[in-house]
Amino acid sequence: MTTTLVKAPFVNQLTINTQAIHTNLKQLRKHLPNDTRIMAIVKSSGYGVRDTVKLTKMLASFGVDLFGLAYTHEAIHLRDAGITEELVVLTPLREDLDALVHYNLQPVVSDPDMVLNLSQKKTPLKLHLHVNTGMNRLGCPVQKALPLARLITDDPFLRLEGVMTHFCSADNPDQDPLTHQQIQQFRSVLNELKAHEIPVPWIHASNSAGAIRFHIPECNLIRPGLTLYGIQPCDGEPLPLKCALSLKSKLIGLHKCGRGESVSYGRTYRIRNQEALIGVIPLGYHDGIHRAYSNRARVWVHGVEVPQVGTICMDMMMVDVTEVPNAAIGDEVVLFGKEQPPETFASFGKTIAHELISCLGPRIERTFI
Ligand SMILES: Cc1ncc(COP(=O)(O)O)c(C=O)c1O
């Protein structure tokens, strides 16, 4: 007996426009000095894009030199899929030593214990040294950078491949005094290393906002994530980026409701007009559209901007489509894309585009076009 595989197609679609990503890389490069290279941040499943193997291969073909992952197992996933590029693990854990060595990964280190434990593996390994200049998340204190760099360079197996810091508010002009202070501190470390003739192949500090807003001549590498997808990381003079992500769904239900009726759990929305047409979309908080978006988000149906109404459910949300001419089940709904960028949609949920896209759930099909 033959078995026929019948699949239920995904209604929710996240499309990733590869040409737009290429354009965004070119725009970033145009904005930077000629010799600046790129470490693409592809952690957290490539910010929710999911197919990090495809993403990494594509970015490598566009000339990206290094790839930044948060955790070791994310890098192992890429190695197991045959990715041979330079993979930097931003947050290596003490449990990961064997894996870091075995998979030839580049851990970012902040403390002597990690360095000494890696040294005991007696295997050649490239390390990046993280200096804390104000983020207070990872990194060694500025005063400890030189001894830590020495510990690495004095080791016969370890190589100091990079020195980095991370800005906490490069996107916010109100915090520029702090960012300049961070740059100064980082610069003092780099000068110290130079004075002690410690060579460092890669010097990196900037995320997307930092790369756009600050020119740091000492740095020869940037670490963008968001801008690859065409999302503006900060207000003010934007780069001419192209939105590479679009989230679409469909109307799966329609209700005619009368004045005074409520929509969804908790009755947080009441119909004020004589009559309203309420549409149902198969996206809810399990899909990453959190309850914070309730009664605040706006989506597009047939080119008409409509309000989301009622509390967002686990699997569904409702929208008021009264103003959409001939709204029908099956009509396409755009949450973000050409009509409104992800950063605008994110603002409805009082969040940022990083959180919106990286939390999109598994019931959304990802398609590279
Ligand atoms: C250490 C580090 N560098 C770079 C980035 C990329 O930031 P963005 O997506 O804003 O460019 C991140 C993202 O969180 C990060 O943690």
Image (spheres, rainbow, N blue to C red):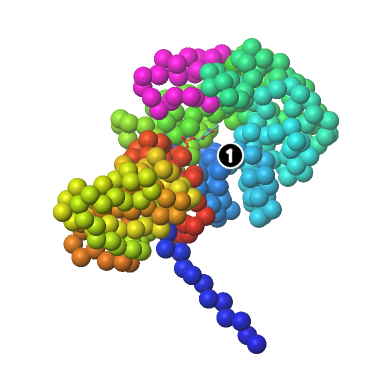
User: In the rendered structure, does residue 76 fall within the stretch colored magenta?
Assistant: no
- Asked if residue 186 shows in the view, the reply is no
Q: Where is residue 23 in the image (x, y as percent from the top left)?
A: 39, 48
Is the N terminus in the top left, top right, bottom left or bottom right quadrant? bottom right
Q: Residue furthest bottom?
A: 1
Tell me: is circle 1 under 8 Å from ligand 1.
yes
Q: Can residue 204 be seen in this view?
A: yes
Name the residue nearer the viewer: 231 or 296: 296
Kind of residue sitting beneath label 1? Gly
Residue projecting furthest to the front: 260
| Secondary structure mostly seen in the magenta stretch | helix
- Residue bearing the label numbered 1: 68
As helix, strand or loop, the secondary structure at mark 1 comes to: strand
* 167 in the magenta segment: yes
The residue most toward the left is 274
Examine the rendered structure and indicate whether residue 83 appears above or below residue 236: below
Does 258 sit above or below residue 1? Answer: above
- Determine the image quadrant of residue 2: bottom right
Going 54% across and 14% down the picture, which residue do you hit? 185
Number of dots carrying numbers: 1
Picture residue at 44% right of the left edge, 34% below the top: 208
Location of residue 154 in the rendering, given as x and y in whole percent from the top left corner = 77, 22
* Rendered image quadrant of residue 24: top left
Region of the chain picked out in magenta, as a range: 166-188
Mark 1 Cα-neighbour bin, 10 Å: few <14, some 14–19, many ≥20: many
